[in-house]
Image: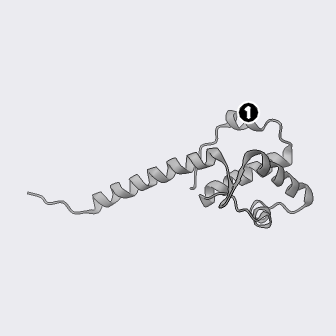
Amino acid sequence: MNFYKHYISDFNGHTAHLDWLEDCAYSRLLRIYYLRENPIPLELSEVYRLVRAVDKQQRDAVKRVLKEFFSKRMDGFHQKRCDAELKQYLARAETNRRIAQLRAVPTKKE
């Protein structure tokens, strides 16, 4: 997914209490989620690498954000809004694929 809608007032309304590092961590986690079209991996060392959290303060911020905004499941850390947006995006993509396939099929001209 190369694009997602970012509603600034929604984002700010839910994240106004975050400090600078937490805000950065959350933004990066969202971008990774959408780019990979999958939940955030469970392995924290991989998460740190993906969001470029290199020191203890940054890693602690990532952990706090994961705890507050994501739910841990068997396949990774899920974020409710991301899951809903991805579901909608993937449904549209499938519809577009079917439409493209139908257009590619030659039709009989009488």
Looking at the picture, how far across and down is residue 42, in whole percent? 73, 62
Q: Nearer the viewer, residue 69 or 26?
A: 69
Q: Secondary structure at mark 1?
A: helix
Q: Which residue is mark 1?
A: 13
Q: Name the kind of residue labelled 1 in the image.
A: Gly
**x and y, in percent, of residue 13 in the image:** 73, 33
Residue 56 image-quadrant placement: bottom right
Q: Position of residue 77 (x, y in %)?
A: 70, 55
- What is the quadrant of residue 33 in the picture? bottom right
Closer-to-camera residue (43/35): 43
Position of residue 100 in the picture relative to residue 89 (left or right): left
Q: Quadrant of the N terminus?
A: bottom right
Instruction: Look at 14% across and 60% down and name the residue there.
Output: 108
x, y (%) of residue 28?
Answer: 73, 53
Q: Quadrant of the C terminus?
A: bottom left
User: Is 75 or 17 nearer to us in this picture?
Assistant: 75
Q: At 45% from the left edge and 50% from the top edge, which residue is drawn?
A: 92
Residue at screen point 62% across, 48% down: 82
